[in-house]
Image (cartoon, rainbow, N blue to C red):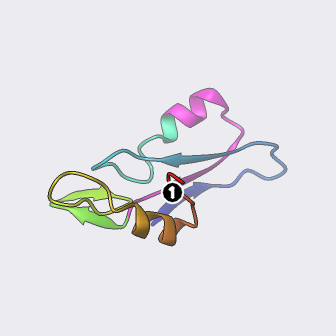
Amino acid sequence: MFVGKKMKDRKHVFFSFHGTGGEAGQLYDIVTAIDPTASYIGVEGDVLEGESRRYFKRYKDGTADLKIFSTRYDFNLSNT
């Protein structure tokens, strides 16, 4: 899920990514305080941990499943 505000003919676009348990629109006020004329895209994690939204799964030991994260979001997070 994402929330967006597109402003016609604007030079700036802000992408926001919430922390654990957040939602797509929670940083909207901060973004508009920085630049009220910018377009805004807020992305919401689709992995649930309890009732908290995340962008990736965590293992029982608390480490992140970076392989799935990098595959889903097309990032290379390897340490090599």
Which residue is the extreme one toward the front? 80
User: 64 left or right of 37?
Assistant: left
* Image position of 11 with respect to 79: above or below: above
Q: Where is residue 65, by image quadrant?
A: bottom left
Residue drawn 45% across the image and 49% down it: 25
In percent of width and height, residue 54 lies at 33, 57
Please tell me which residue lies in front, 65 or 12: 65
In percent of width and height, residue 58 lies at 25, 59
Residue drawn 66% across the image and 34% down it: 36
Residue drawn 29% across the image and 58% down it: 53
User: 6 left or right of 22?
Assistant: right
Amino acid at the residue labelled 1: Ser
- Is disc 1 surrounded by few (<14), some (14 to 19) or many (20+) residues within 10 Å? few
Residue drawn 79% across the image and 53% down it: 8
The magenta stretch spans residue 1? no
The magenta stretch spans residue 39? yes
Q: Which quarter of the rendered picture does the C terminus lie within?
A: bottom right
- Magenta span covers which residues? 30-45
Label 1 sits on residue: 78
